[in-house]
Amino acid sequence: MSNENAILNAEELDDLDEDLSYLEELEEELQEQLDFEISEFEFIKKEKEKIGSPEALGETIKGVIWEQVMNQVAIVAGEDFIKENGGMTLDLRDEAHIQTTENFENGKIAKHNTEIDYQERFDEWQSNFQKNEDGSIKTDRTGKKILTKESRDYYDEGREKGSKTVHKDHTISVGEITRDSEAATHMSKEEKKKFANSEKNLNDLDASANMSKGDKKMDEWLDSERNGEKPAERFNLNEEELREKDKIAREEYEKKKAEGKKKSIEAGKKSQREEAFRIGGKALRTAIVSLLAELLKNIISKLVKWFRSGKRNFKTLVKYIKEAISLFLDKIKTHIVNAGSGVITTIASSIFGPIVGIFKKLWMILKKGWKSLKEAFNFMRNPENRKKPIGVILLEVGKIVIASLSAIGAIVLGEVIEKALMTVPFLVIEIPLLGSLANILGIFIGASISGIIGAIAINYIQKKLEKKLKNEATIKQIEKGNEILVAQAKIQKVSEQKLVFTKMQTASNIKNRHDKLSEYIEENEKDIKEKEKGLKIELEEYIENSNKNLNDYIEENTIIITNEEIEEQKKKDEEFDEIDSLLNGILD
């Protein structure tokens, strides 16, 4: 490329155009690769932050404990409840019933909601996008999801389309509606179509302008330029009117989405109530489950606090657990208004005694349960498992540890605590399908204790691996950073190559224009000289002819007078003068 300004012939220019097209495609592919590498880098960075994080551990343990509680409740409730509940165990959390847009985007579906089939909505939404081989959604260079060709067919069925010259344009395009995760979450397929083809969104628009707009937002399209002209100028449109129509359509669109969101919340709450009543006990059972969830929250909060404290021993652990249960009992005081303070005191003394003794036993079980810890340790050392997110690894390890302790921690402990609580008359009350309050509390506290023991084990393993995992995460960050630098270098190299080719093409274009101009000037100069020569000859001929004609005219019209004639004329003049004098004298 030393001679970048070399003159290229037609064949070489064609080759250059092909090279430029190839470089543009290559640059686009490299940019997509760079975007992917950057997203991977951010993921690795976030995962590194979770290593050794008590908060991350707390979230994992909460999930493990809740799973244990739900499993035990399902066993007690029996197969009848599971069948009646669509094959699902009890789950009254908001995310299990009330679908949020964020969870919907991430494929986390509120499957316990019996009012709206969000899984069907999610599958229908995903079917509108083109997919890569790995199942991810294809996007263009701006990050916009690429739709399938069939994605708008449903919206076009039975709607007015206008004429050849004036189309019926979706002010908010079908593409925008289809990509909108909020609309996909909270509006049914029929509701989206009804809005898309409504009077407020379907408006007349010049056919050429409509094709130019495509699925762009109205403001984005109106603000764009082509050859220095905006769409309103190119297509002779009333820009102010179009923006007003867009404003009206968007207000209606947001209104419909808000209504859909309200329906989602109402449907979720209704589904929650129905599932709560389905398990039996109605208001009492709902209060108990909410209290148990509060206890779970308190235990996890105190457990994370214990992990962060400087003194991590059995005595301080019991202290933190007591604080969590005390908060739980305060909650019971708030909700069970008919229970006297004496009953609460009896419950407290009945709970604290068994728990301390049980923890002493389980502390010994943890020391002897090296087999389960070894399995967990081997799982985390497995290179294949290291590729998994830290939350998944901790969850799996938690399951391994909990599995070895569940028989003792969830069943035996539940029975022991239940027997201790059965001495309190208030807790003998039976709830349909679930059993007694003592049984419910026994199950929950037993599972919670098992989860706490599992948390201690996981924390122990995590501390052993924390440094190594962080080093590996750092290495991955560096490697990924290097990959990003390589991708950026490739893009820069391609851009430089494109610049060289573009300069060559520009130089050749300029040279071609100069050559054409030179040819034009040369042809015109030659033509001017020939015309000048012809005019000169014509002028000379004209002058020659004019002189000749003038001479001929002079010769024909010239009068020759001799001296004698002149003298004779003088005499005549003198005679006339004399006669004139005589006449004048007579007259006087």
Image: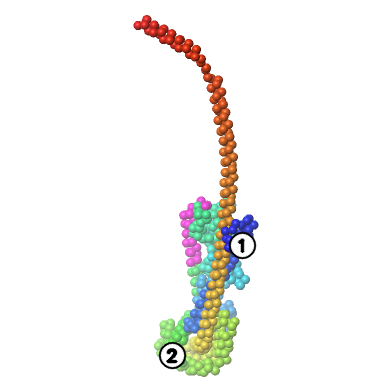
Q: Main secondary structure of the magenta part?
A: helix
> Distance of mark 1 from mark 2, alpha carbons?
68 Å
Is 204 located above or below residue 433 in the figure?
above
| Amino acid at dot 2 | Lys
What is the secondary structure assignment of the residue under circle 2?
loop
The x and y percentages for residue 46 are 50, 77
Residue at x-position 55% and y-position 89%: 373
The x and y percentages for residue 364 are 52, 94
Q: Using a 10 Å C-alpha cutoff, classify the residue at mark 2 as few (fewer than 14 neighbours), some (14 to 19) or many (20 or more).
A: few
- Whichever of callouts 1 and 2 sits on the residue coming sooner in the sequence is 1
Residue at x-position 58% and y-position 33%: 538
Residue at x-position 41% and y-position 8%: 578
Give the position of the N terminus as an image quadrant. bottom right
Q: Quick check: can you spot residue 154?
A: no
Residue at x-position 55% and y-position 56%: 212
Q: Mark 1 sits on what residue?
A: 19
